[in-house]
Amino acid sequence: MKTIVAMNICMILFLASCSCERKKEEAFIEKNATSNGMIFNQKQFALVNVLDKEFFDMCHIKGSLNITLDKLENYASENWNKDTTEIVLYCSNYMCTASFAAAQQLTDMGYKNVWAFEGGAAQALHLASQLGFEMQGTNCQASWLLDYEKPATDDQMDHESTVNIISAQELKKKIEKFAAKV
């Protein structure tokens, strides 16, 4: 009898400690949304870094979520309002097209308040002292962060679409508007 009770307790504890991959991802995303004392109400504003986790961990704007392109549609559908949530997506720098692709994806899904910050982490880092961007990560001196300037020829940025582009100055205003220190 004691063995059965002990096995049942162990099973309950084991099941309670197990979680599916989705729960782990949600916990990781939520942890990043509240990192270092800055939090955004995700129903109002989301600042999303769409890079792979290793690059996100290297350097990102404080308070950013890390949601890769393959997970963006599901996360958006479950967490954001298509009419009211303001969403800014960014990646590494002007040469990276992931933020634009993510913004296009959300716009195609019917989200009305979506912007791509195409200067990405590199431009935010470069303007950190001037505009007050708070950056965090394990290696904000990585070589890919040195490429922060907008290309002289804007062939890569010549997008004919409905995606809104946000400047670093406009992004900083949004962060200040929606950020709450805890």
Image (spheres, rainbow, N blue to C red):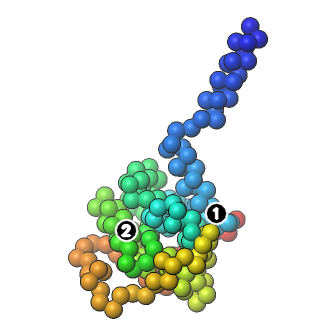
Tell me the residue that label 1 is attached to.
35
SS under mark 2: helix
Q: If the image is split into quadrants, where does the N terminus sit?
A: top right
Q: Of residues 177 and 38, which is closer to you in this image?
A: 38
Tell me residue 9's x, y (percent). Answer: 70, 22
Specify which label sits upstream in the sequence, 2 or 1.
1
Q: Of residues 118 and 54, which is closer to you in this image?
A: 54
Furthest residue to the top?
1
Please tell me how crowded label 1 is: few (under 14), some (14-19), or many (20+) other residues with Cα within 10 Å.
some
Q: Of residues 140 and 21, which is closer to you in this image?
A: 140
Furthest residue to the bottom?
152
Residue 80: assigned label = none
Marks 2 and 1: CB-CB under 8 Å? no
SS under mark 1: helix
Q: Within the image, what quadrant is residue 94 found in?
A: bottom left
Furthest residue to the right?
2
Name which residue lies at 45% across and 65% down.
51
- Camera-nearest label, 2 or 1: 2
Tell me residue 34's x, y (percent). Answer: 62, 61
Residue 98: assigned label = 2
Placement of 181 over or under 7, stated as above or below:
below
> Can residue 42 be seen?
yes
Q: Of residues 161 and 80, which is closer to you in this image?
A: 161
Name which residue lies at 54% across and 43% down.
23
Measured in 3D between alpha carbons, the distance from the residue under mark 2 to the one under mark 1, in whole angstroms, is: 23 Å
Name which residue lies at 57% across and 53% down.
28
